[in-house]
Amino acid sequence: MTNQAIIDEIRRLKAERNACILAHYYTIPEIQDLADHVGDSLALARIATKLEEPIVVMCGVHFMAETVKMLAPDKTVLEPAPDAGCSLADSCDPVEFEAFVKARPGHTVISYVNTSAAVKALTDIVVTSGNACEIVGSMPADEKIIFGPDRNLGSYINSITGRDMVLWDGACHVHEQFSLDAILKLKAEHPDALLLVHPECPRPVRLVADKIGSTAALLKFAMASDAREFIVATESGILHKMQNACPDKLFIPAPPENGGGCACNNCSYMKLNTLERLRDCLRDLAPQVEIDGALAESARRPIDRMLDLSAKLGL
Ligand code: 13P
Ligand code: SF4
């Protein structure tokens, strides 16, 4: 079957099922083009609270599907790739995290949305890369805070807000591998290019960035900028929207540690969302996301706090 035939089938099934397709910017271009909404983690969470369709398909990784289910418990939430984990979420075991939190009484626990429901249930406020600095910055300066699981995002928030949050030692395998040397070499070849960096990247890469932000913030910056060339240090899927939104601009994927043999940085988990799996899940109405009721309730609380705080801060 050709890709076009599968795409036609997905469109037909989507209409028949009255389903809404959500996709993260890191999914393959064909899925982004089929989706009703493509966004960063924050936008996707917000959309999840306003869905009209009874069925929603989350093309992303498992914690994103869990978040949608918690925010839209009455919907049938499908995930084409239930095996799509996240190395960052996996770097935070809930049992170990609970011990880490218990060993530091009196701390507010702030967690990145890239966590399991079990870790969210141990959390006071969830943040995404789209609102983390503003939410932490809005807390009293002397508030004691634990931040997990991303040490890179955590140190970035500390540097911007002047806080001294205690950091869990986790990281994302895609963003950890960007090489400063390779980026500087590329920058020498493209002296006018601006460097766009996701805050999950290590500090040396962040220090040479022209813009640091969530996937949505990087896209917005590229669209508004007068520059013609950009080096992009985040997962390569975002280049699809950047190139579509700015056809006259050049977007160059930042090379990974291995020197950029592949000229790309792929999140292998996100790429588990294939056209075939999207079609199959719409056809079979499976796999569905299910979360234990008590766990869902505890894990939703810090997500709701994030959405409330974001709205109050005008984000
Ligand atoms: P965003 O918050 O930009 O969507 O990033 C999510 C993510 O998984 C980055 O690796
Ligand atoms: Fe997780 Fe990294 Fe993939 Fe984002 S890019 S979903 S943080 S593994």
Image (spheres, rainbow, N blue to C red):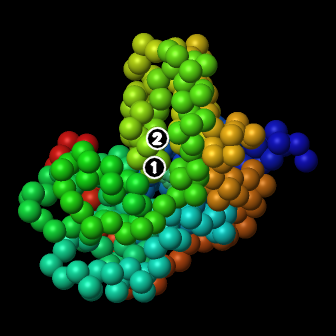
Q: Is residue 32 left or right of residue 157?
A: right
Q: Residues within 10 Å of mark 2 (few under 14, many from 20)?
A: many
Q: Is residue 46 left or right of residue 312?
A: right
Question: Residue most toward the right?
Answer: 1
* Residue at 47% in and 23% down: 194
Q: Residue 33: which quarter of the image?
A: top right
Q: Is residue 95 above or below residue 161?
A: below
> Where residue 136 sits: x, y (%)?
21, 55
> Where residue 8 sits: x, y (%)?
77, 42
The residue carrying mark 2 is 205
> Where residue 105 sits: x, y (%)?
19, 82
Q: Is residue 37 above or below residue 146?
A: above
C-alpha gap between disc 1 and disc 2? 6 Å
Query: Can residue 50 be seen in this snapshot?
Result: no
Disc 2 C-beta below 8 A from ligand 1? no
Q: Number of marks in the image?
A: 2
* Residue at 69% in and 46% down: 258
Q: Is residue 193 above or below residue 310?
A: above
The quadrant of the picture occupied by the C terminus is top left
* Residue at 48% in and 61% down: 171
Amino acid type at image mark 1: Pro
Q: Which mark is residue 202?
A: 1
> Where residue 232 sits: x, y (%)?
54, 33
The answer to the question of whether label 1 and label 2 lie on touching residues, with beta carbons closer than 8 A, is: yes
Front residue of this view, candidates 120 and 307: 120
Q: Residues within 10 Å of mark 1 (few under 14, many from 20)?
A: many
Q: Is residue 113 above or below residue 39?
A: below
Amino acid type at image mark 2: Val
* Residue at 40% in and 76% down: 119
Q: Secondary structure at mark 2?
A: helix
Query: Can residue 99 be seen in this snapshot?
Result: yes
